[in-house]
């Protein structure tokens, strides 16, 4: 079973990198196994067989709370079912990487970040990585062929069977059409597009203050979400050596494209090529807009509301 990080990364081109992030503790693995098994059991309308299996798998872990848990899970799936194919939509720095992992935990479906996959390919210096490296550093868009190929392979994997969260894909109308076509081939379609709306002028501070834990994709911010270990110098600037991941203690890094200059190009690409995708999905009634220009907790409350089908 994949950990959050591995689920975001694993794809044919970068499998070796994703594999480094495989789940560590048996407890986490078992929790995530139960979570991922649940949509299947509820898909058939809670058949007697499914309920028995579900109760058995739950009782192995938490005997005493079986009744309460069962009710909670039933509520969860009556609220969020059917199969979720979500697009997390928004400019660089909107909060896709911040809220995506929380949706993963809630629904037990993987977040597929083309940015993370491409960065892993660059780090592993695969053929795809070599082609993408310079374009990414300058804030340009990698070719549609490459990213469509990455997503086509990734969504065939077993953990995507009950849905997935797309982060950073599609970014052009060409990619959108390719996505719709590959989903239609298996009788599926995009069920929700969650647009995180933030004015451009807020994004430079977010992007230039972002630090990430490369392996997991966890993101921090010097002002809005500092790691516990952060220390500042006499000018109030963070000391690089003190920027460590809260969970692993490993060093954090800044992305080479998280600069004010590259952001200008990334935002131009977002407004010119990516925003038109909303017009494509609006007539289907699946677009939900969230005000992402507020504190993270407030954003999460709105994201949750947008996920509900009630
Ligand atoms: P994206 O994945 O959309 O590019 P991130 O989730 O990585 O964006 O967020 C960009 C930066 O802004 C990160 O450093 C993150 O900690 C910070 N951030 C995210 N949401 C908020 C918010 N609502 N308010 C302030 N800072 C935020
Ligand atoms: P952000 O949302 O913060 O801009 P991402 O991590 O999604 O950043 O993407 C980083 C870079 O990877 C992009 O600037 C682009 O060069 C490349 N990239 C990611 N996804 C795509 C995509 N769907 N199409 C083309 N290029 C992509």
Image (cartoon, rainbow, N blue to C red):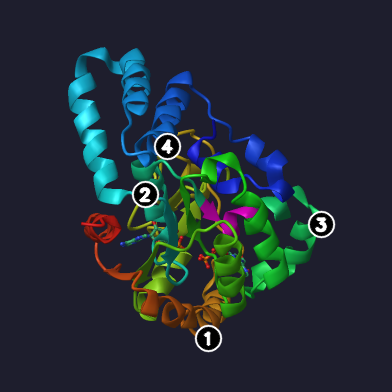
Residue farthest toward the front in the current orientation of the protein: 48
Sequence-wise, which precedes: disc 4 or disc 2?
Answer: 4
State the SS at label 1. helix
Side of 122 where 243 appears, left or right: left
- Residue 60 sits in quarter: top left
Q: Are marks 4 and 3 in contact (CB under 8 Å)?
A: no
Closer to the eye: label 4 or 1: 4
The crowding category of the residue bearing disc 2, from other C-alpha atoms within 10 Å (few below 14, some 14 to 19, many at least 20), is many
Sequence-wise, which precedes: disc 4 or disc 3?
Answer: 4
Sequence-wise, which precedes: disc 1 or disc 2?
Answer: 2
The crowding category of the residue bearing disc 4, from other C-alpha atoms within 10 Å (few below 14, some 14 to 19, many at least 20), is some
Closer to the eye: label 4 or 2: 4
Q: How many marks?
A: 4
State the SS at label 2. helix
Residue at the location (47% across, 43% down)?
242
Residues in magenta? Answer: 112-119
* Quarter occupied by the N terminus: top right
User: Disc 2 marks which residue?
Assistant: 103
Estimate the x, y position of residue 100 in percent, counting from the top left: 41, 53
Above-or-below relation of 211 to 31: below
Q: Looking at the rendered structure, which numbered label has been put on residue 40?
A: 4
State the SS at label 3. helix
State the SS at label 4. helix
Above-or-below relation of 156 to 292: above
Q: Looking at the rendered structure, which numbered label has been put on residue 127?
A: 3
Above-or-below relation of 87 to 267: above
User: Disc 1 marks which residue?
Assistant: 272
Residues at marks 2 and 3, CA–CA distance in whole angstroms: 32 Å
């Amino acid at each position: 079973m994949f950990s959050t990080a591995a689920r975001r990364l694993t794809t044919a081109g970068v499998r070796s990198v994703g594999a480094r992030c495989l789940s560590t503790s048996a407890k986490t693995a078992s929790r995530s196994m139960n979570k991922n098994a649940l949509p299947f059991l509820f898909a058939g309308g809670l058949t007697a067989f499914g309920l028995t299996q579900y109760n058995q798998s739950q009782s192995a872990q938490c005997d005493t709370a079986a009744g309460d848990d069962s009710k909670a899970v039933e509520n969860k799936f009556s609220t969020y079912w059917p199969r979720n194919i979500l697009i997390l939509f928004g400019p660089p720095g909107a909060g896709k990487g911040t809220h995506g992992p929380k949706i993963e935990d809630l629904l037990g479906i993987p977040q597929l970040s083309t940015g993370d996959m491409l960065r892993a390919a660059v780090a592993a210096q695969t053929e795809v990585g070599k082609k993408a490296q310079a374009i990414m550093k300058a804030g340009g868009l990698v070719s549609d062929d490459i990213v469509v190929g990455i997503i086509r392979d990734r969504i065939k994997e077993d953990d995507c069977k009950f849905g997935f969260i797309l982060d950073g894909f599609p970014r052009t109308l060409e990619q959108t059409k390719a996505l719709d076509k590959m989903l239609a081939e298996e009788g599926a379609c995009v069920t929700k597009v969650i647009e995180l709306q933030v004015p451009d002028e807020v994004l430079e501070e977010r992007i230039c203050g972002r630090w990430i834990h490369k392996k997991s994709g966890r993101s921090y911010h010097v002002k809005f979400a500092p790691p516990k270990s952060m220390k500042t110098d006499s000018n109030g600037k963070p000391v690089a050596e003190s920027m460590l991941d809260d969970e692993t203690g490993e060093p954090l890094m800044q992305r080479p494209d998280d600069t004010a200059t590259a952001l200008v190009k990334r935002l131009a690409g977002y407004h010119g090529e990516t925003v038109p995708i909303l017009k494509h999905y609006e007539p289907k009634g699946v677009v939900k807009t969230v005000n992402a220009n507020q504190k993270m907790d407030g954003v999460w409350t709105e994201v949750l509301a947008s996920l509900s089908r009630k």
